[in-house]
Image (tube, helix red, strand yellow):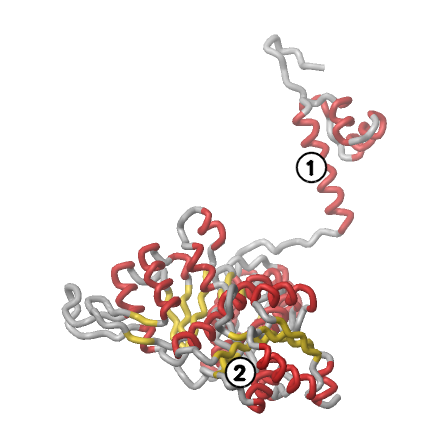
Amino acid sequence: MNSQQKAATRRILVVDDDRDVLSLVKTWLTADGYDVKTVTSGEEGLTQVAVIQPHLVITDLFMEGMDGMALLSEIHRENPLLPVIMFSGQARIPDAVKATHLGTSAFLVKPVNKDELTEQINKALRITTDPLVVATFAQSIIYRSRPMAEVIDRAQLVANSDVTVFITGATGTGKEVIAKAIHDSSSRRDKRFIAVNCSAIPEQLLESELFGHEKGAFTGATIRHDGLFRAADGGTLFLDEIGDMPLSLQVKLLRVLQDFEVRPVGSTKVWPVDVRIISATHKDIDEAVEQGEFREDLLYRLKVVPLHMPELAERRDDIPLLAEHFLGEYAKKNHKQKKRFAPDAMDYLVSMSWPGNIRQLNNVVELCAVLCTSEIIPMSLTRQSLQEKPVQIQTLREAKQAFERSYLTGVLRITNGHVANAARIAGRNRTEFYKLLNQYNIDPVQFRVKKTDGKQEE
């Protein structure tokens, strides 16, 4: 399929209150084979997004009523992966930076150049995707399970933009690893990736660590410190465990994300910063917002694109791959021959619940490699290294029987062993209900409450 045939399958919505610009851009894109729809206001554009479901939106920044920034925010509230290209003849650099961080695929200055617009459209729609980039994305992440494949696909879609990404997941699921993969596949890959654990630094020091301080700003500030925002300028700042950030700092972080400027502690001067923010937490962040522990307006800025890392128990297909990888890493680091798990030992690993996720698996595999004196790691050593009962996956029949037994005892308990009432709740007649009780050896008399005189209620 050639580029024009690919373009013909793509719908583009163009939003601008300048009809001359609309006519020119539509002529260009139609000639390239795109299906183009034009509208003259942000409000109408938002409606058409729902109606025609475009593959790309191109919008002006300054318009009457809903402007381009508001349109961008509304679009990404419902569909954070829909690419948006913004252009303007009046924009300042802060406008371009803000639009980029809110999730635009590109920001162009009017008068728009056709070749430049075409190039940005191709990038946004990935018509000319370099297969090498696709093949190397997240190559450090070991997976074959469907849950992880979905995460990787979504991460790859947003990697080459400056949109903020919010990663949730339990401790040890690899949130920092996916954040680094996004950075390494972005246009910022040649700049720094800096990770900071917001829960590991005391509140009074975290502000200085993030935003910097002047000499003498506080006791112990003997030298000037630029802070991590300025250190990561041009690159990516990964705010891990941001759900633990104190509310007082959340306000200051929100201001930085709004203005893209930082003011060091003890300084009256502000410094412009160009940093992509990726944040992560193991907490239920929506509950934290409801409890007043996390600012909703800050979450709105951070959570343009949400990613959720599945727990290891949800991606059991990956456990053999990960275990083999960790054994290889251990052998390489310690200059030893690579060991392998016996088949029953590997099955045992796959059956475990892994509350500590990948980090726990790595520790267990390394312990097995250290303790094993032979090439094959046996089941006995694997059990010893991880003292936990394996999760037994029930058959459908076993699960059904367990549910019925639990249900029967439950209705008997709330009816105090009154069979007629229990059968009525269960939607069965008394004969059928007695058969079920006999099947599971359940005696309704055991659930009857004794009266004060020692007799049981009937």
User: Does the rendering let one see residue 360?
Assistant: no
Q: Nearer the viewer, residue 216 or 271?
A: 271
- Residue 45 found in image quarter: bottom right
Q: Quadrant of the N terminus?
A: bottom right
- The picture places residue 339, in percent across and down from the top left corner, at 56, 77
Q: Position of 233 compared to 100: left or right?
A: left
Tell me the kind of residue under disc 1: Ser
At 16% across and 64% down in the image, what residue appears? 218
Q: Position of 49 compared to 237: left or right?
A: right
SS class, disc 1: helix
Q: CA distance from mark 1 to mark 2?
A: 51 Å
**Residue 354 to residue 23: above or below:** above
At 71% across and 35% down in the image, what residue appears? 407
- The picture places residue 201, in percent across and down from the top left corner, at 31, 62
The numbered disc on residue 406 is 1
Q: Nearer the viewer, residue 147 or 404?
A: 147
- Residue 35 found in image quarter: bottom right
Mark 1 is surrounded, within 10 Å at the Cα level, by few (under 14), some (14 to 19) or many (20 or more) other residues, namely few
Mark 2 is surrounded, within 10 Å at the Cα level, by few (under 14), some (14 to 19) or many (20 or more) other residues, namely few
Residue projecting furthest to the top: 453
At 23% across and 66% down in the image, what residue appears? 265
- The picture places residue 52, in percent across and down from the top left corner, at 69, 68
**Residue 394 to residue 267: above or below:** above
At 26% across and 63% down in the image, what residue appears? 205
- Say which residue label 2 marks: 337
SS class, disc 2: loop
Tell me the kind of residue under disc 2: Gln
- Residue 260 found in image quarter: bottom left
- The picture places residue 9, in percent across and down from the top left corner, at 73, 79
